[in-house]
Image (cartoon, grey):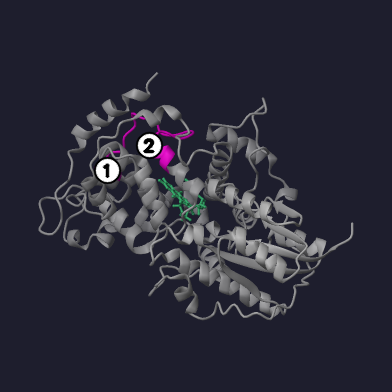
Amino acid sequence: MDKYKRGLVWLRRDYRLVDHAALKEALNQCEQILVAFVFDTNILNKLKKEDQRISFIIDSLRCVDQELSQYGSRLIIRHGAPEEKIPEIITTYTVDALFFNRDYEPYAKSRDKKVQEAIPIPVYTYKDSVIFEKDEVLTKDGGHYKVFTPYKNQWLSKLNQEVMKPKSSSNHHFLPVSEDSSIHENRWFELLGFSITQSFLPGGRPHALQQLNKFKSKIQSYHIERDFPDLNHTSNISPYIRFGCLSIRELVMFALHYPSEGADIWLSELIWRDFYQMIVATHPNCHIESVKPAYDLIEWEGHDEDFMAWCNGQTGFPIVDAAMRQLNTTGLMHNRCRMIVASFLCKTLLVNWRKGEAYFAEKLLDFDFASNNGGWGWASSSGCDAQPYFRIFNPTSQSKKFDPDGRYIKTYCPELAHLSSKEIHDPPPIDGYPAPIVDYKLNRQRALAMYSVVKG
Ligand SMILES: Cc1cc2nc3c(=O)[nH]c(=O)nc-3n(C[C@H](O)[C@H](O)[C@H](O)COP(=O)(O)OP(=O)(O)OC[C@H]3O[C@@H](n4cnc5c(N)ncnc54)[C@H](O)[C@@H]3O)c2cc1C
């Protein structure tokens, strides 16, 4: 087949030039290529003006731009609706084929459809952000799995060298681009209407690699230490995975490089990620309907004031408050704590889990629609392979078990710093710290009654 003269690679959640499926194919199929990113106003207009992800994205794009400039090109950056900006770039640069990696989220799918309809050139899309797409790991009857463990076993049985092979090309014939996107200047924050004074976490591939490097000494004992928020023994790689500063293939290869129980469990977490991507791809309405529809019949009894106390880390339950304050001040939260606060919101405060899902979506640096929806579905019992509805985390027992000395709590709730390991999980009245806003035992009974509509 003749090569295209000029191909455009559109970056969306894959901010790297290494092991990148769409880029590899574009380099193979085109004489010259250019790489573009659109700050999507459909998304940006809904964000708070201090949203930390903008800073992370700008850092990451800077790294891509720097790398492209080594090949004599630049990253083309636009600000607007992709269905307008991508056609404009195609016209300006007389592009004759568009390449991008597939994204399975509901909004992304409708965005990509609009872009494809707006352009008169061929569009090529690729699997890149998952190891297996929805129809690649199927039950014996050809259906989609609803339970994780058999999905994982089938996933593992399909993993081979071919799937893992890096998607890289040795040809780097990028189009010399003269426009200066000036991503190196702070003007991008102004242009986008954001004001970020200090960033929680630097974005970009070099930082992602550093982070992964730090995890080398922890992966083999991951299975023992991962559940203790104070130990910081997880990889902390999620924002870099979310924005594709590393490829998922690199991460699976990393896990396989350290054969051990720890690495096996860590690999399982990456498989959970693929599982939730599959659930989203097979439940296109999961942003508005529960995966288990009966759960949409629940009449939530919780109050707005309690939801606000939860958001602000002022519930009087120290482990919950510490976790919410970690989220508010760092954009991240340890996985064990995500499970605790999510369960607490819907099964102790009796607040609709969709509100918590939306709050996480607003605050998390690693916010990923599929993993977030899956995590909330698990905690609220409304998702696939979720907790049974009658399993309700007791925040005090969780706290004693996973933060026995209260070190995590004390990091984020300094007003409790003087308490002993015994007192910290259920503190006596303290000036400047709220008393518990609800009675756990009473609300446990109320939750069971509230959830009873889903029985049968
Ligand atoms: C209510 C709730 C909401 C969540 N929202 C998100 C989200 O928006 N974005 C997100 O990336 N993760 C989400 N998670 C999953 C998990 O909490 C984070 O991936 C993890 O805490 C990130 O820390 P880490 O990189 O140190 O993880 P590690 O423990 O080192 O795990 C490695 C990677 O595996 C993946 N992973 C780990 N656990 C899960 C999981 N349960 N589900 C899917 N993928 C997983 C992540 O990509 C993670 O970076 C959520 C979990 C819950 C319970």
| Residue 346, image x, y percentages | 31, 39
Residue 22, position as x, y percentages in the image: 71, 58
- Mark toward the start of the polypeptide (2 vs 1): 2
Do we see residue 237 in this rendering? no
Residue stretch rendered in magenta on the structure: 376-398
**Given the current orientation, which residue lies at the most extreme right position?**
1
Residue lying at the far top of the rendered structure: 456
The type of residue carrying mark 1 is: Pro
- Prevailing SS of the magenta stretch: loop
The spot of residue 277 in percent (x, y) is: 56, 44
Measured along the vertical axis of the image, is residue 294 above or below residue 116?
above
The residue wearing badge 2 is 380
Query: Which label lies toward us, 2 or 1?
Result: 2
Answer yes or no: do the residues labelled 2 and 1 have beta carbons within 8 Å?
no
Q: 10 Å neighbourhood of mark 1: few (<14), some, or many (≥20)?
A: many
Residue at x-position 48% and y-position 79% = 187
Q: Look at label 2 and name its amino acid.
A: Ser
- Of residues 62 and 246, the one drawn nearer to the viewer in this rendering: 62
Q: Which residue is drawn at 48% across and 67% down?
A: 56
